[in-house]
Image (cartoon, coloured by chain):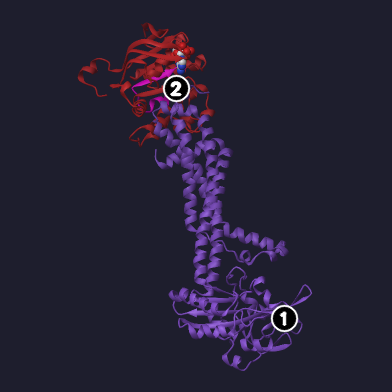
Amino acid sequence: MSKTKEEVSEPVRVAMVRDVTKVYRLGGQDVKALAGVSFEFKQGDFVAIMGTSGSGKSTLLNLLGCLDRPTSGQYLLGGHDVATLTDEEVSRVRGRYLGFVFQSYNLIQQLSVVENIMVPLSYQVPVRPDGRELSTKLATLVGLAGRLDHRPSQLSGGQQQRVAIARALVNNPHVILADEPTGNLDTATSNEIMDLLDVLNKTGRTIVMVTHEPDIAERAKTVITLRDGLIQSVEQNRS
Amino acid sequence: MNVIQQLKLGFRSLMLHKLRSALAVLGILIGVTAVIWLVAMGEGVSYQAQQQIKDLGATSIIIRTIKPSEEANSDSGSRSGIAYGLLRSDYDRIITNIPTISAAVPMREISRDVRRDEYVVPAQVIGCTPKYFSINRLPIARGRPLAASDLQGLENVTVLAHDVAERLFPIQDPLGRAIQIGTEFYVVVGVAQDRTAAAAIGGSFSARQYNRDVYIPLNTFQKRIGDRVITVRGGTFQNETIELNQITAVVDDVAAVDASADIIRALLERYHKTVDYAVVVPKELLEQAETMRMMFNVLLLLIAGISLVVGGIGIMNIMLATVTERTREIGVRRALGATKGEIVQQFLWETVVLSGTGGLLGVAVGFLCGPTVQGVRFAIKSFMPDVWLTLPPTIHQLEPRLAPWSIIAAFGISVGVGIVFGIYPARRAANMDPIEALRHE
Ligand SMILES: Nc1ncnc2c1ncn2[C@@H]1O[C@H](COP(=O)(O)OP(=O)(O)OP(=O)(O)O)[C@@H](O)[C@H]1O
Ligand SMILES: [Mg+2]
């Protein structure tokens, strides 16, 4: 997205959902995972999504991540109306505008640290010639300079999540989406990961993160609380 | 990603399950090796057959005496003996009546033991004319071939084939020395060069073993051995009269071979009540052999194709297991921007690595065909000499001939099979719902 004069003063809108619903049909019954959610994500936002189990947090994040399509409502990402895109275009949008961090790291076992970080680049057209240098730089940034050629199975959970974060950064995404990124980690490691996300946010990246731990959510700028598929509250944290 | 990166990634992914991947590779390897070996053996056999037929000469027509069936000659009575086969008059008629025939050689043969002092060698005694040597392309190693004067003078002279000479005269020079056939002595005037067997002509004749022959002038044969052959079989005397066993006619022009053969057939038909002869045209044999070779190759390809399909099913099996196991990876890759097409590609490259590796190894093993055949032959010869002797000469002399097309075809088919059988698992991977895939345990 190119910046116009007007947008320099005001934060750029990177993603927006308007009245999105998601209905799962189970047997004869409809399950409303999202019942009409509207929100705008601006550049530099750090949003935590909270809510009880089954409130629709993951469903919303999957929609934001273009892994799923809403039953109704509109989702705009990077100027695209996601509903109008083909499967291939949606894949390209994911690769270009989004970075993912998962609860269970989801690194590819047969690849080394650097190669895992490089994976999103292999789906970029045109191919970046400096992919390996960039990945090495990012691995260093997340504190894994000494483990470039290690396999995921040789790393601790926290280290694996760092690799996952580096991987989410490599394509220079507009938004980083994280579903319970600290869910499998102890408190100390969780804080380290959050420090890392903080740093990224300070450098201008938009982060949307699902969590059900209040002290993790506290470190975000904005906390959205979902309940039964609806936004119950939006709070701004004082930093 | 470029091809090399794709192949590397495929290889790395397959290395996650080394044994499983190795077994799939083995399936393809065996298929490819089977194609190459079977075709090489087939080519070897048919090449041998073709060489043997070519030895008979593309411009020759061979007329052989054959024993007529029992009921056909029952009227002639078994006590007085039967007379059958080609006649000396047939030979005269053929050379005088058919202008396209430039040369012809009459021949009479019989199995006899040949002696010299304490050496006894079972041999095929051939009564022939001097032209026999040139028409059958039998070069003389030492001495001279039979001469026209030998025939006119009814001389007791002989030319020995290579093996016979070697066995009768292990040390001495046979030239000028005498050998004994029956009660008669013959002076050796020449020794023929070593010569491998020629093709079996017609169903009933076995391959011509030139190396066991002893040549004497036809007229001498007629005088000393005679037309009548008496054999004792089951306590009764069998009494057969044969004038000539074979006439080899040579035509100037290959184009005239078929027509000339037809004339010979018609000519013989007029003078023979029973069919006690066969007209064999090597050129036709050659054409038949060529047809046989092609049919053989098609059959082999079919068999080999089946084994490759079996290998392909192995690959499909393994790729399906791989796709299921790596559901998460597929989900992750989709989330990180991979399109369905890119997932299909990734898994297809993996099957290409599998089948390509199998194919390359199969080609490598394919090249071992010749040494393997030689090794097996040597092993049988050294450890089971009895078995060796019972094997037909075709196997004694078999040299597998690697056919370049079979190598290319085998490799191509193996990679093709990999792709065909890889498409379904790859599409299955690509069509997974990314969310489901990410949630997969
Ligand atoms: N694939 C699906 N099919 C049917 N129903 C589903 C599916 N995915 C989610 N749901 C339903 O949608 C609702 C919201 O699910 P979601 O996964 O978004 O919850 P969540 O807020 O992420 O919960 P948790 O904190 O346990 O992860 C739930 O009631 C769930 O049962
Ligand atoms: Mg969830």
Report the amino acid beneath label 1: Ser
- Label 1, secondary structure: give it: loop
* Residue B170 visible in image: no
Q: Which of the numbered marks, if any, corresponds to residue B435?
A: 2
Residue at 66%, 62% in the rendered image: B378
Q: Which residue is mark 1?
A: B80
Which chain letter matches label 2?
Answer: B
- Residue B332 picture location, percent across and down: 45, 26
| Quadrant where the image shows the N terminus of chain B | top left
- Tell me which segment is drawn in magenta: A165-181
Residue at 77%, 82% in the rendered image: B118
Residue at 64%, 60% in the rendered image: B375
- Residue B141 picture location, percent across and down: 59, 82
Query: Residue B79 vs residue B353: left or right?
Result: right
B314 in relation to A121, above or below:
below
Mark 1 closeness class: few <14, some 14–19, many ≥20 residues within 10 Å? few
Determine if the C-beta at disc 1 is less than 8 A from ligand 1: no
- Residue B433 picture location, percent across and down: 44, 25
Q: Nearer the viewer, residue A215 or B211?
A: B211
A187 in relation to B407, above or below:
above
Residue at 52%, 30% in the rendered image: B324
Q: Earlier in the sequence, mark 2 or mark 1?
A: 1
- Label 2, secondary structure: give it: helix
Which image quarter: residue B234? bottom right
Instruction: Name the colour assigned to chain B in the rendering.
Output: purple
Question: What letter labels the chain drawn in red?
Answer: A
Which chain letter matches label 1?
Answer: B
